[in-house]
Amino acid sequence: QLQTVESGGGSVQAGESLRLSCAASGYSVGSQCMGWFRQAPGKERDAISTIERDGTASYAESVKGRFTISKDESRNIVYLQITSLGPEDTGQYYCAAGFGLRTGQCQIPVQSGAFHAWGQGTQVTVSS
C-alpha cells in the first residue's frame, strides 16, 4: 500500500522557520520524483518544490532562496526546510510522488495531476 505522511507544520510568527517531513511507505523516495505542494485558503494546490531521483531540486519563484528540499533515502523521508516565513506562506502543505515522471519532467512547473500517493497534508499558519 502506498502511503505518504506529512508532519512538522505549526503556527509560527513571521520570520521563523520550520522543517516539514514527508515519510513514505510502499515506495522509495529515492526512486522517483517527489514534490511538495501548498494550498492556501481558497486557492488551488500549487507545486512549490520538487526533487528528482538524482537529487536535482527546483523551486517556485515565490519560495526560491527560502525553501530547501532534501531527502534521506535511508529513512525514506523527504524534507522541506522553510525559512523567513511570511503570512503568504500560510496553507496546507502536501507531499506526493511523481511516479513515471522522467528526468527533466520533475522540475517546476509541474501539474499536481501527475503526482500520486498524496498525504493528508500538514498545516502551516504564519502570523505577522
Image (tube, rainbow, N blue to C red):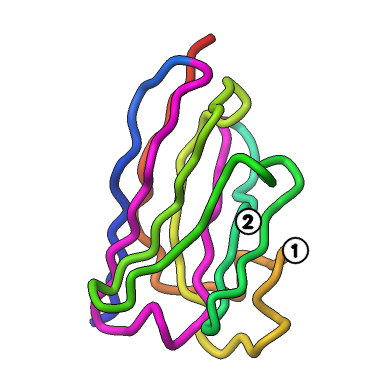
Q: Residues within 10 Å of mark 2 (few under 14, many from 20)?
A: many
Residue 80 percent coordinates (x, y): 45, 51
Residue type at the position of mark 1: Pro
At which x and y percent is residue 40? Answer: 57, 35
Instruction: Residue 10: say if magenta.
Output: no
Q: Which residue is mark 2?
A: 47
**Of marks 2 and 1, which one's residue comes earlier in the chain?**
2
- Judge whether residue 39 is colored magenta: yes
Give me the residue at 62% from left, 26% from top. 88
Look at mark 1 in the image and give the residue it sits on. 109
User: Quick one: SS at disc 1?
Assistant: loop
- Mark 2 and 1 residues: CB-CB less than 8 Å, in contact? yes
The residue located at (66%, 43%) in the rendering is 65
Q: Name the residue: 61% across, 74% down.
A: 56
| Residue 10 x/y as whole percent | 33, 29
Q: Pick the residue in front: 124 or 16.
A: 16
At x 58%, y 20%, the residue is 87
Query: In the image, is residue 87 above or below residue 49?
Result: above
Looking at the image, residue 87 sits to the left or right of residue 19; the answer is right
Which residues make up the magenta segment? 14-41
The percent coordinates of residue 48 (x first, y second) are 62, 52
| 109 with respect to 63 (left or right) | right
